[in-house]
Amino acid sequence: MGLGLLAGALWATVLALTVPGLIRWSTKQKTHYEDRLVRSLERFHIFLRIESLRWLGLGSAMLAVALSWLLFGALWIAPLLWLGILAAILMLTRLRLARRYRLIRYQLPAVIELLATSLRAGLSVRAALSQLVLQSSRPISQELAMLDRMQRIGMPLDRALSTWSHRLPIQELQLLAFAINVSAASGGSLSDALDRLAASFRQRLILEEKVDALTAQGRLQAWVMVALPGLLALALTLIDPDSMASLWVSREGHIVLAAVMFLEFIGLVWIRRLIRLQD
């Protein structure tokens, strides 16, 4: 009896010490990921409030509960399925952002050359940047329109360029803003500097394309590695459904599937990091 009371008191003490810290940690993590998702959507020019994202999270949780009950007949899978849905949303957002950044980088050399041509024609930097909004295509035209709005509301050019260039994690935009600000402060020939900058950016893109071609086999191996276990499981299910039934309907099989998917995800991330071109 005394040992039971002592153990209960010990567990109560442990919970009292750890639960507040866990609550603070979970609140901090929730705020971090909400802010990160909001910033990612703003880079798509999609502006949502935190409350809307929380409602979307609640809706995805209800969807996970419904799918876990309808597909597997087990509600304990719902948290794993919900985390998978959130991870898929974050991954899709990240992939779309990476594609958007890549398009902007490919558009940037031509935009810089247009800017240099406008400056040689006698336009000011502000007027030339405003003209680029009409002369360029999306997605870079959206970013240039935001820079133009900053100037129209009276923000100084150097501050507007600094804010605009740090909005996206694209090093070329920061170099462009730095070149314009330095030229405005020193009085040098900005058009010649922009021509050299555009040529440098174009050469860098060519180099990255060569690296992508050389690492294409590694990327293909990563996706084959991820797809092979699932395809093999489906093939074995078609060949011998009785032997594979426990994998799909039992709790132990669900645990194995969750472990396999987690390890496959870790392997995919690892291989992609190994073949990624470092800045």
Image (cartoon, rainbow, N blue to C red):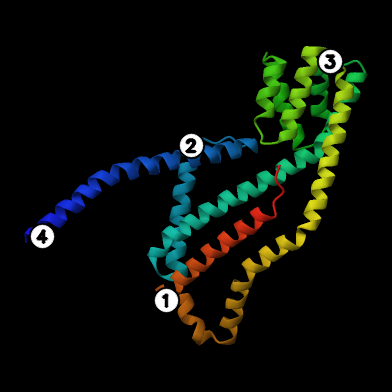
Closer to the camera in the image, 244 or 136: 244
Quarter of the rendering containing residue 223: bottom right
Element carrying mark 1: loop
| N-term mark: 2 or 1 | 2
Q: Which mark is residue 107?
A: none
- Crowd around label 2: few <14 · some 14–19 · many ≥20 (10 Å): some
Q: Mark 3 and mark 1: span between their CA atoms?
A: 70 Å
Q: Which residue is mark 2?
A: 50
Q: Mark 2 and mark 1: span between their CA atoms?
A: 38 Å
Q: Residue furthest left?
A: 1
- Crowd around label 3: few <14 · some 14–19 · many ≥20 (10 Å): few
Quarter of the rendering containing residue 250: bottom left
Task: Look at label 2 and name its amino acid.
Answer: Ile
Could you tell whether 165 is left or right of 37 in the image?
A: right
| N-term mark: 2 or 4 | 4
Q: Which mark is residue 250?
A: 1
Circle nearer the viewer, 2 or 1? 1
Q: Position of residue 127 (x, y in %)?
A: 82, 18
Q: Which residue is mark 4?
A: 3
Closer to the camera in the image, 182 or 82: 182
**Tag 3 and tag 1, C-beta contact below 8 Å:** no
Q: Which mark is residue 124?
A: 3
Question: Residue at position x 61%, y 57% from top?
Answer: 270
Task: Look at label 4 and name its amino acid.
Answer: Leu
Question: Residue at position x 71%, y 24% from top?
Answer: 147
- Crowd around label 4: few <14 · some 14–19 · many ≥20 (10 Å): few
Circle nearer the viewer, 2 or 4? 4
| N-term mark: 1 or 4 | 4
